[in-house]
Image (spheres, rainbow, N blue to C red):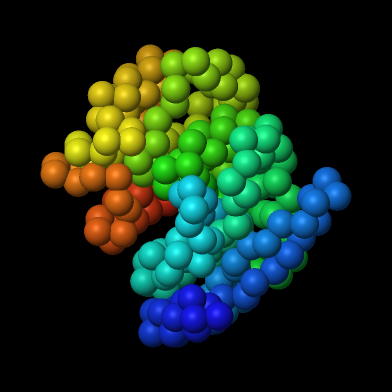
Amino acid sequence: MRATVLLAVALSSAGLSSPKHHTVTCDQRAYDYVLSAPKSHDRLPAIMLLHGAGGQASEMVELWAPLAAREHVVLIAPQLPRELAFEQVAPAVFRCVLADAKRLAAVDSDRVYLFGYSMGGYLAYDGAMFDSDVFAAAGVYASTIDPDYYSIVDHAKRKIPIAIFIGDHDRYNPVDGARQTRDFLEQHGFPVHYLEFPGQDHSYSPVGDSVNSDAWHFLSGYRLPH
């Protein structure tokens, strides 16, 4: 309850409506997500936010609230199960959650983006490749593609643009792995924006404003082609 109240205060101060918690059934399983949308008569861009292991959807919305208010962006943050089996169904769940959010908010389908942190970043790579016709572009912080799973790029219907952010003192996802992911994606024709943060570890919140601002500058430059 306290986290919900703090998030509501943060969004209110940022000029956004209070977040709404919703539940949607995807393939006979219920999934919770947080939705925050500016009031608008126009279709707005949206970002699906994927939290890290042990994190909360509301934390991601809170970190993105100032930018969302400034840029008039819809935020959609599913609560992710910490289960290995979830990876197999994650892209389908993301599509399901997005479809439900579109019933409730004015979302421009050509300008829906994906951003994930740590575990959420890992899943964002999956979502980007399997749903490249749903998300216009994707961004990740503190996550890489393991070489054993490089084959996921074969599922991409388009060369989706991807922004990669990493701290050079990340002991969970070493910077060398991020550079390898960058090089691999570029070699396979994906537009990549890459940024390292000197002295930064795995933590997202200390560099959240900088990451989010830079990520949005990159993501917002793309929309789904027709």
Please name the residue shown 64% across and 62% down the image.
Answer: 33
In the image, residue 47 above or below residue 41: above
Name the residue at the right extreme.
28
On screen, residue 48 versus residue 185, left or right, reads right
Q: Nearer the viewer, residue 102 or 27?
A: 27
Residue 138 lies, in percent from the top left, at: 47, 41
* x 44%, y 16%: residue: 147
Query: Which x, y percent locates residue 120?
Result: 49, 45
Q: Position of residue 221 (x, y in %)?
A: 40, 47
Q: Is residue 209 above or below residue 105?
A: above
Residue found 67% across the figure and 54% down from its top: 98
- Whether 106 is drawn above or below 176: the answer is below
What x and y, as percent, mark residue 45? 53, 59
Q: Is residue 43 left or right of residue 89?
A: left
Which quadrant would the N terminus be assigned to in this image?
Answer: bottom right
**Is residue 58 visible in the rendered structure shown here?**
yes
Work out which quarter of the rendered image holds the C terminus and state it: top right
Q: Who is closer to the viewer here, 144 or 85? A: 85
Q: Quadrant of residue 180?
A: top left
Answer with the quarter of the image where residue 153 lies: top right
Tell me: 91 left or right of 123. Answer: right
The furthest residue to the left: 199
148 or 185, which is in the foreground?
Answer: 148
Residue at horizontal 60 percent and vertical 57 percent from the top:
79
